[in-house]
Image (cartoon, rainbow, N blue to C red):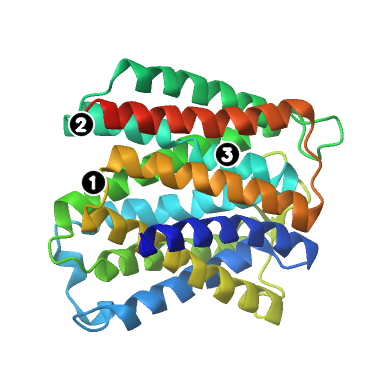
Amino acid sequence: MFYLLLSVLSSGAMVLLFKAFERFGADTFRCLIFNYITAALWCNIMAVDGPVVATNFWTQPWFSLTVFLGILFIGIFYASALTAQRIAVSVSIVASKMSVVITVLWVSWFMGQRISLLVWIGIAGALAAVWLTTRRSENSRAKGTLFWILPLIVFLGSGIVDSSLKYLEQTFFVSGDVNEQLGIIFMIAGICGILILGGRRLVGNTFPLAIGINSLKVTAKGMYTWKPILGGVALGSLNYLSTFTLLKTLNLGLMKSHELFPVINVAVVAFTSMMGVILFKEKLNYTNIVGIVLAMLFIGVIAWGSVGSQ
């Protein structure tokens, strides 16, 4: 239960940090790079068998999957940050955490766990709740196609990440120490970020990272100022804690995965939505509030239906 609580709090705090980056003028993408460097360092420090970089990790059967996840991590993380900044914290977290429906489908189709009718009802309602929660007023800074693309990327990408982490945990985490695989994922994500920054040398003085957001450009200038370093260290520590505690909770077997993901997600949705209003004075319209309430309700339906199907 301790790991479960830490996973909820650290996951919620990460989304709130995305909003804080904007408020304090810290470049989000540079923060993400230092975030992955920090998270990878934590993995090397905490690894039971010594530093990850001292092992022949590239010969392991899980290496190709961790490379894929590392690339996906930084892309989804950045889309989540943009959603929190350009639309709202609540939209970012709901789009991310409602991806539980993808994880439930994965558990059913590829891992052979039966899904009850009640869970299917919960999945349908969850998708409707995502749509309601992302309905913003005309004052939202994200408009047009971008307004729908960002939450959709976060939703689909987060579902793929959670499903892949579950597969990784069940297939390869035999010893119970998750730091080696996590260390590779974080290192690959950090390398991808550095390569993207290096791309500016090939395409010009700036390198766009999001379609339709002309104001968000990444340059090498200011890379090592204190804001992205400090923000990245804080985010990386939370990122490591969030992912480590999630995998440890799965590894301990306190709950089945199709129960655990909904329980964690509903708690994170409630926590971040409330803190977004309190800390950043976010204004949610009636439709958004209904969407958040329905999201929590239908995640509960999924969890209840999963328990009933055992």
**Callout 2: SS:** helix
Distance between mark 1 and mark 2 Cα atoms = 10 Å
Estimate the x, y position of residue 80 in percent, counting from the top left. Answer: 58, 48
Q: Earlier in the sequence, mark 2 or mark 3?
A: 3
Residue at coordinates 66% horizontally, 31% vertically from top-left? Answer: 133
**Callout 1: SS:** helix
Q: From this view, report whether residue 302 is shown above or below residue 197.
A: above
Depth check: give the residue in front, 40 or 279.
279
Q: Counting other residues with Cα less than 10 Å from the Cα at mark 2, is it few (<14), some (14-19), or many (20 or more)? A: few
Question: On residue 110, which mark appears?
Answer: 2
Labelled pair 1, 3 in contact (Cβ < 8 Å): no
Residue at coordinates 70% horizontally, 76% vertically from top-left? Answer: 227
Q: Earlier in the sequence, mark 1 or mark 2?
A: 2
Q: Counting other residues with Cα less than 10 Å from the Cα at mark 1, is it few (<14), some (14-19), or many (20 or more)? A: some
Which of the 4 image quadrants contains residue 44?
A: bottom left
Residue under label 1, please give it: 167
Numbered label tally: 3
Residue at coordinates 76% horizontally, 38% vertically from top-left? Answer: 142
| Residue 97 seen in the figure | yes
Indicate the amino acid at tag 3: Val
Question: On residue 94, which mark appears?
Answer: 3
Distance between mark 2 and mark 3 Cα atoms = 25 Å
Q: Counting other residues with Cα less than 10 Å from the Cα at mark 3, is it few (<14), some (14-19), or many (20 or more)? A: many
Indicate the amino acid at tag 2: Phe
Q: From this view, report whether residue 98 is shown above or below residue 21.
A: above
Labelled pair 1, 2 in contact (Cβ < 8 Å): yes
Indicate the amino acid at tag 1: Tyr
Estimate the x, y position of residue 5 in percent, counting from the top left. Answer: 44, 59
Q: Foreground mark, 2 or 3?
A: 3
Q: Quadrant of the N terminus?
A: bottom left
Q: Earlier in the sequence, mark 1 or mark 3?
A: 3
Depth check: give the residue in front, 110 or 71.
110
